[in-house]
């Protein structure tokens, strides 16, 4: 007896093997290196993108919040991991799945890479809707690739997305708790001609 | 994989640093060309700088994911699709290359903390390269004239705004001087205007009154 969650991952992963080019694309997208770098580059790009002083400080504060949210999201996901301890799909349904990715050893819920991606995308979305939507799409694609590869359940992806968004919102409140430290830090970086 | 994970990690770190450096350089170039921050442009022309940035990013991705084809590593003759434990040291075939980089961090892949460290170093290096190239471009090619000859003018922009019309070396003294001049007032104003429940206000608030 399998749940709807498991049926979806078994069905999606069952599509692999039909189109080698698509499978290879998913292997690259699912990589630990490409999408996390895209999110980091998104933050880096925003830092330098402001066209006037007001826009620049807004972009840079949001970038700092985004970077902080990425770090906090990792901690929150780790707490969920040790509390929920949901096994990975390939552990429970290994005979029905063809893994396209190495078998991770940490628990499944919520999806850490998706939480990180959605935290970064939300930071971008708050200051630039169009760019934020592109990052949301990248984060969703990252989640889909891991689902297709057979290492996450759909609810892990949804849980990861919600954690990422919630953590960004929490971080914006945390910023007010730490003011004027954050604004002063940006002013210090401006003193180094980098902000 | 019978290789020491430390050896694999060193290889991944070197490859990842190059990847992160080139993509960071590309991203900075695209951003500063759009924002008009000439002091960080690699070339005197905005359009050329932007296209150069795009080229850096595409080249970096192509190099990083094709390296297993021509560099020996932990990606040969094993279940490259899923298992990073049964692979041999060597080069990957075309069929294996897409999954070759998928190596678990317990087998030598880079975990999130290490990636963060290498990315930060790469981004700072990319900024330094941009600043040096921008300085050479402005000073040697004389592409931009200073906006104001009077460095004591308080209206002369500093930080990234100052780099719109100056090289990094010309801009830095102004930026640092303004930081020194403004920081105390900025800090005390920030303490006064912070939320009453601000941790920083509760620590420093009394002493700043």
Image (cartoon, grey):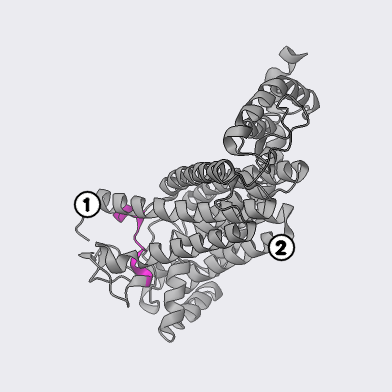
Q: Secondary structure at mark 2?
A: helix
Q: Residue at x 36, y 69 (%)?
A: B99
Location of residue B30 in the rendering, given as x and y in whole percent from the top left corner: 60, 56
Is residue A111 in sight in this rendering? no
- Binning the other alpha carbons within 10 Å of mark 2 as few (below 14), some (14 to 19) or many (20 upward) gives few
Q: Residues within 10 Å of mark 1 (few under 14, many from 20)?
A: few
Which chain is indicated by disc 2?
Answer: A
Residue under label 1: B4
Give the residues drawn in magenta, as a range. B98-109
Q: Is residue A68 left or right of residue B205?
A: left
Quadrant occupied by the N terminus of chain B? bottom left
Query: Is residue B103 inside the magenta stretch?
Result: yes
Q: Is residue B84 above or below residue B133?
A: below
Say whether residue A54 is left or right of residue A122: right
| Residue at the left extreme of this rendering | B2
Residue B105, quarter of the rendered image? bottom left
Q: Residue at x 53, y 77 (%)?
A: A8
- Compared across the picture, whether A119 is left or right of A176 comes to left
The residue that label 2 is drawn on is A130
Q: Nearer the viewer, residue B10 or A91?
A: B10
Q: Is residue B79 above or below residue B166?
A: below
Residue A66 rendering spot, x and y as whole percentages: 62, 47
The numbered mark 1 sits on a residue in which chain? B
């Amino acid at each position: 007896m399998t749940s709807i969650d498991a049926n979806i991952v078994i069905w999606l992963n069952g599509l692999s093997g039909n189109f080698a080019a698509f499978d290879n694309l998913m292997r690259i997208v699912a990589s630990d290196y490409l999408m996390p770098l895209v999110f980091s580059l998104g933050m880096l790009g925003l830092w330098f993108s402001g066209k006037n002083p007001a826009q620049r400080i807004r972009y840079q504060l949001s970038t700092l919040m985004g970077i902080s949210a990425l770090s906090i999201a990792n901690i929150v996901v780790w707490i969920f991991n040790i509390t929920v301890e949901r096994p990975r799909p390939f552990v429970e349904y290994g005979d029905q799945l063809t893994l396209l990715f190495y078998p991770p050893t940490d628990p499944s819920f919520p999806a850490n890479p998706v939480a990180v991606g959605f935290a970064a995308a939300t930071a971008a979305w708050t200051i630039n809707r169009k760019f934020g939507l592109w990052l949301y799409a990248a984060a969703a694609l990252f989640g889909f690739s891991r689902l297709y590869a057979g290492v996450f359940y759909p609810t892990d992806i949804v849980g990861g997305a919600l954690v990422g968004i919630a953590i960004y919102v929490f971080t914006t409140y945390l910023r007010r708790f730490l003011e004027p430290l954050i604004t002063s830090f940006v002013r210090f970086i401006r003193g180094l001609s980098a902000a | 994989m019978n290789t020491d994970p430390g050896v694999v990690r060193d290889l991944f770190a070197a490859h990842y640093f190059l990847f992160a450096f080139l993509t960071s350089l590309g991203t900075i170039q695209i951003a500063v060309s759009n924002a008009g921050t000439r002091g960080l442009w690699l070339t005197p022309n905005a359009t050329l700088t932007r296209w150069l940035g795009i080229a850096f990013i595409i080249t970096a991705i192509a190099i990083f994911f094709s390296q297993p084809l021509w560099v020996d590593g932990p990606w040969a003759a094993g279940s490259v699709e899923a298992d990073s434990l049964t692979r041999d040291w060597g080069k990957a075939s075309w069929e294996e290359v897409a999954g070759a980089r998928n190596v678990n961090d317990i087998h030598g892949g880079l975990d999130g903390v290490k990636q963060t460290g290498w990315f930060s170093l790469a981004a700072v290096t990319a900024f330094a390269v941009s600043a040096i190239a921008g300085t050479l471009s402005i000073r040697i090619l004389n592409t931009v004239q200073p906006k104001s000859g009077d460095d004591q003018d308080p209206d002369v922009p500093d930080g990234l705004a100052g780099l719109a019309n100056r090289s990094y070396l010309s801009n830095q003294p102004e930026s640092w001087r303004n930081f020194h001049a403004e920081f105390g007032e900025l800090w005390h104003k920030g303490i006064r205007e912070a939320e009453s429940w601000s941790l920083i206000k509760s620590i420093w608030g009394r002493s700043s009154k």
